[in-house]
Image: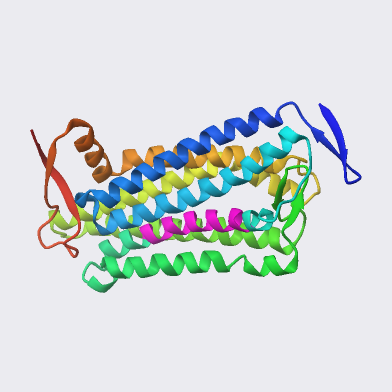
Amino acid sequence: MASIKNNSVTINVESWFIPLDILSLICLSFLIMITVIYLCIIALDKICHTVRMILFANTCLTGLVCGITIFASTVFTLCNDLKQIQYQDSMCIVRGYLVYVSPALHAYSYVLATIYQYMLVVHPTRLFWNSARTQIILIIIGWILAFAFIIPFLFTGDIVYDFNNQICEIPLRLSFPVFYIPLVVFVIPITVVMVFYFKLVRYVKEMGKNLTPAATLLRAQRDLTMVRRIVILLQILLTAGCPMTVFYVLSFFNHAPKYHTRIGYFFVGISLLCVMIVSFQFTDLLKASVKKIICGRRTRVVPMFAGRSTALEMKIVETLN
């Protein structure tokens, strides 16, 4: 451990700081690369131009924003660690602001996808709700709200520079922001997803008990599977995010570790990378596009179900040499 003094403040540079920073940057680099590849494929391949893929693209884009934000913060931290200095640049508060906005964007992208799948099953005749235009409008509204919810803390001085973690953040202590931010960013969106998931499970079970046409029941079960996959992705995020959750709880008793943000960011980067990798396995159209690119084959698509409420929903049925 090395110790320096700058501006009358002693800074401890632990031996594990720089290796952890480098590992975080490697992980975040893969995350950024993967999400950019996904977005390029979705934009360029016409078979990915469906409502579901628009929502998935929103999830990828929010994941990219998260990755870039944490990457920029980690680069700043690494530079200060290498120089063994404490230094707050002009963009520190902005990065601190985006650190709270970006996970909100990502979490609410799952809310939109879940509600879409629910409406597709329970209210398939509401074409306005299920249209691409409506979903794009909702995505824009979600982005505006995510950027707005943290703005008050920019003017109250709650986001401050923490020289131990070399980042601007809201200090973990018993305060309103520490309750408010997890509630808005994590608790509310996860609760909404779970409520709609269980409502959809119950609805599909009722359909199975009634004399529901086989094709309709099959569509409902497929949409339920889509929502179940979203729940799995959230479980991955929550599992990898356990360290930050523990730190938040410990902060209520003034026992949070001094370097909680460094540790927390590392696990957040890993969780986002895992989610994006698993998302590829869960997204059939994306897998089909990648296979087409790799194998140099052309793929023919037809409507998945005749009379579906949206003509944009399609399924890969045959790959030709």
Numbered marks: total: 0
Screen quadrant of the N terminus: top right
Q: Main secondary structure of the magenta part?
A: helix
Screen quadrant of the C terminus: top left
User: Could you say which is closer to the camera, residue 277 or residue 80?
Assistant: 80
Residue 100 in magenta? Answer: yes
**Residue at the outermost left position:** 321
**Residue at the outermost right position:** 8
Q: Residue at x 49, y 58 (%)?
A: 105
298, above or below 178, in the image:
above
- Asked if residue 288 lies left or right of residue 93, the reply is left
Q: Can you tell which quarter of the image residue 211 is in?
A: bottom left
Residue 280 in magenta? Answer: no
- Asked if residue 267 lies left or right of residue 164, the reply is left
239, above or below 199, in the image:
above
Residue 238: give x, y in percent of width and height. 53, 45
User: Could you say which is closer to the camera, residue 313 or residue 71?
Assistant: 71
Q: Residue at x 17, y 58 (%)?
A: 216
- Asked if residue 46 lies left or right of residue 224, the reply is left
Query: Visible in this render: residue 126?
Result: no
Query: Visible in this render: residue 92?
Result: yes
Residue 282: give x, y in percent of width and height. 32, 42
Q: Residue at x 30, y 52 (%)?
A: 224
Residue 53: give x, y in percent of width and height. 29, 53
Magenta segment: 97-114
User: Could you say which is closer to the camera, residue 100 or residue 29?
Assistant: 29
Q: How is the image coloured?
A: rainbow
- Asked if residue 214 lies left or right of residue 288, the reply is left
Q: Can you tell which quarter of the image residue 38 is in?
A: top left
